[in-house]
Every structure is written in structure tokens, then in C-alpha cells.
Image (cartoon, helix red, strand yellow):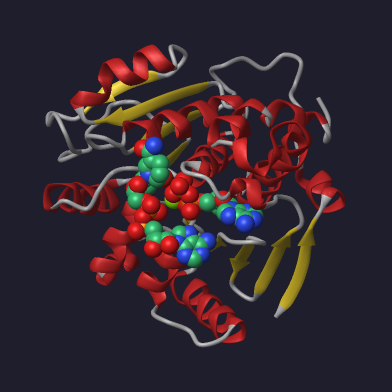
């Protein structure tokens, strides 16, 4: 196993500054798929985080009940809706996104499971899989072989346990995740304190972030950030490394003004700009 610390020196090697002559059409189009009745906020957070991380265009694919919510809360984001009101049942779109993030707030209802299966069979874009989409994979493990190489999975400890089963020590957990990453050729963002990223036999350990991130929606924001970087043509492993680093750095930057208690997921989004500025333009 090779172990690498994700610090400023490491991310500076992969960070791409913005070209003076770029435009929104070549800056990457990210599609965020998720939300269900009562959990539209998750996709608002992911979509806004994607825009703030620098991609040129963001579209949210959500159930109909979220249409006004997303349009009003983030006017910069375009919206496509499912035919169903309260859940996603048929993921159908004509745009060609450069990356897709799927799962925040999507729920695990049977029609949503079926839609996710169809999506996996037909999708051609690089993907980040999070939250309930991970739980759906855990319920249907044979679908794991439908994932393209280097698909990014972002489980928190409970989602990870559902995917790979229980472990009895940190060493055993790491062995199991490495084996899982190798078996399906996946990039695993193993969220925690600290977050590790596993790409086969290489394990990256993040150095940013603090307990302020233990707040609702902070993972939804991370999904938007990594999807945005993927859409901007970062290789999957580099999108995961840079996304996790910047996400943690926002909490380190904000902590002196928010304290641990009052920091919320929207504060991550507000500080993405300052985090980016520590690396370049
Ligand atoms: N505003 C919104 O719309 C929000 C929607 N969310 C969505 O709600 C759905 C359910 O997500 P949840 O993650 O809450 O549900 P889960 O049932 O997947 O996870 C919650 C369980 O995991 C455990 N857990 C979480 N992090 C842990 C850690 N670091 N160490 C140990 N145990 C840990 C908790 O104790 C709890 O038992 C997802 O689709 C998610 O995207 C949440 O992200 C919260 C905000
Ligand atoms: N104590 C902590 N220290 C550092 N990072 C944390 C801590 N608690 C949570 N995080 C980070 O916050 C995020 C939580 O993600 P997740 O559990 O998916 O949240 P949600 O589903 O509510 O959006 C992860 O990136 C995780 O690493
Ligand atoms: Mg989550």
C-alpha cells in the first residue's frame, strides 16, 4: 500500500488555474441528479456547490415538487424534472454533461431504484455516486459491475458498511476498502475525520477539515464540488483529491468566525472561493 498526504504541496501539483479566454461552454457542464419530497435541499446544496467550484453550467434533475424551490433558491442552475412529483422514476435528459453526481436526497423507493439501474446501463459520463444511490447499490450489489472504471463513490461510515459489510478494526476496514476498490476499479472517498481516498493500492489521507463539518448537508456539498471538478476535466482521482481538500479547507477558513456550532453546509459553499484563492486564481 502506498500512503500519500493530501496537503497544499500535493494539490498544487494537480490544480489548474483558469484560462483568461475560457467561457462557460468549455468550463464544464455538471448534472446533479437527486432530491425527493422533503429532501430537495440536498440537491440545492450540491448544485450550488458545483457552480461555486468553477464549472460553467449546472443542471439539476429533480422530482417535479422541487422545481420552484431550486429555480428560486439558485437562479444560476438550470432544472430538468422527472415526470413524478415526489420522487425520481425515469432519468431522461438530452443534455450532454461532462460529469454527473447522483444520489443526494434521492431516496430508495422502488421506482427510483429502477431508474438508477436504467441510468447505470445507459450512462456514458464520468460519475460521482453518493448517499441513497450508494444505499441502492448496497441493496443490489450485482449492479456494481455496471459502474465504469474510476467511478467515484463517496460513502460515510454507515453507507460504507452497507456496501462492504462490518469491520472490527481500522486496519480491517482499510483492507476491505482497498479490496473493494480493486475489484470494481473504483475511486472510494471514504468520508470521516480524516477522509481517506482509496484508488486501488494507493491511499490518500486528507489534511484539511474539522468537526464543524459534522452538519447536515456537508456531504451533499462535497458531491457537488467533486462533480464540478470532474466536469472541468480533472481525472477522477484528482477531482476527488482536490474536492476533498478544498471542502475541508472551507471549514478551517470559516472556523474562527463561525465556531464549530454555527457552521452549516451553506458556509462551506460561501468559503469555496477563499479556499480556491489559497491555490491560485
Ligand atoms: N437538506 C437535505 O435535504 C438533506 C438531505 N440529506 C439526505 O438524506 C438522506 C439520508 O442521509 P443520511 O446520511 O442522514 O442517512 P443514513 O441512514 O445513510 O446515515 C445516517 C446514519 O449513519 C451514521 N453516520 C453518519 N455519519 C457517520 C460517521 N461519520 N460516523 C459514524 N456514523 C455515521 C449516523 O449515525 C446514522 O446512523 C441522503 O439521501 C442524504 O443525501 C442529508 O444529506 C441531510 C440534509
Ligand atoms: N468530525 C469531523 N471532522 C472532519 N470532517 C467531518 C467530521 N464529521 C463529518 N465530516 C465531513 O463532513 C461530511 C459529511 O458527509 P455526510 O455524512 O454524507 O453528510 P450529509 O449526508 O448530511 O450531506 C464528510 O465530508 C465528512 O468527512
Ligand atoms: Mg451524505
Q: Nearer the viewer, residue 184 or 43?
A: 43
**Residue 114 in view here:** yes
In x, y percent, where is residue 210? 69, 51
Seen at 64% across and 61% down, the residue is 193
Seen at 32% across and 39% down, the residue is 34
Q: Nearer the viewer, residue 266 or 243?
A: 266
Q: Nearer the viewer, residue 93 or 242?
A: 242
In x, y percent, where is residue 96? 38, 30
**Residue 186 in view here:** no
Residue 100 sits above or below residue 178 on the image? above
**Quadrant of image for the C terminus:** top right
Apparent side of residue 116 relative to residue 31 in the rendered image (left or right): left
Which image quadrant for residue 273?
Answer: top right
Apparent side of residue 103 relative to residue 74 in the rendered image (left or right): left
In x, y percent, where is residue 230? 56, 41
Q: Nearer the viewer, residue 153 or 42?
A: 42
**Quadrant of image for the N terminus:** bottom right
Apparent side of residue 224 relative to residue 242 in the rendered image (left or right): left
Most distant residue in the right direction? 9
In x, y percent, where is residue 49? 54, 31
Residue 45 sits above or below residue 7 on the image? above
Which image quadrant for residue 139?
Answer: bottom left
Q: How many marks?
A: 0
Amino acid at each position: 500500500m502506498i500512503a500519500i498526504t493530501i496537503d497544499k504541496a500535493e494539490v498544487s501539483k494537480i490544480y489548474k488555474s483558469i484560462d483568461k479566454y475560457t467561457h462557460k461552454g468549455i468550463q464544464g457542464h455538471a448534472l446533479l441528479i437527486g432530491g425527493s419530497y422533503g429532501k430537495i435541499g440536498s440537491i440545492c446544496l450540491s448544485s450550488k456547490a458545483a457552480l461555486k467550484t468553477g464549472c460553467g453550467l449546472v443542471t439539476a434533475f429533480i422530482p417535479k415538487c422541487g422545481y420552484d424551490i431550486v429555480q428560486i433558491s439558485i437562479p444560476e442552475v438550470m432544472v430538468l424534472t422527472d415526470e413524478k412529483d415526489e420522487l425520481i422514476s425515469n432519468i431522461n435528459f438530452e443534455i450532454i454533461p461532462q460529469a454527473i453526481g447522483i444520489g443526494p436526497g434521492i431516496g430508495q423507493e422502488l421506482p427510483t431504484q429502477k431508474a438508477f439501474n436504467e441510468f447505470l446501463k445507459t450512462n456514458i459520463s464520468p460519475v460521482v455516486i453518493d448517499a441513497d444511490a450508494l444505499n441502492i447499490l448496497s441493496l443490489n450489489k450485482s449492479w456494481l459491475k455496471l459502474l465504469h472504471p474510476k467511478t467515484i463513490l463517496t460513502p460515510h461510515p454507515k453507507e460504507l458498511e452497507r456496501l462492504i459489510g462490518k469491520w472490527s478494526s481500522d486496519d480491517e476496514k482499510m483492507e476491505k476498502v482497498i479490496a473493494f476498490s480493486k475489484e470494481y476499479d473504483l475511486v472510494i472517498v471514504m468520508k470521516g475525520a480524516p477522509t481517506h481516498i482509496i484508488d486501488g493500492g494507493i491511499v490518500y489521507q486528507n489534511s484539511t477539515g474539522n468537526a464543524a463539518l459534522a452538519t447536515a448537508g456537508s456531504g451533499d456539498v462535497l458531491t457537488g464540488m467533486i462533480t464540478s471538478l470532474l466536469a472541468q476535466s480533472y481525472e477522477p482521482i484528482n477531482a476527488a483529491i482536490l474536492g476533498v481538500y478544498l471542502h475541508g479547507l472551507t471549514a478551517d477558513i470559516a472556523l474562527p468566525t463561525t465556531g464549530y456550532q454555527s457552521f452549516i453546509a451553506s458556509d462551506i459553499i460561501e468559503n469555496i472561493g477563499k479556499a480556491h484563492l489559497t491555490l491560485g486564481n
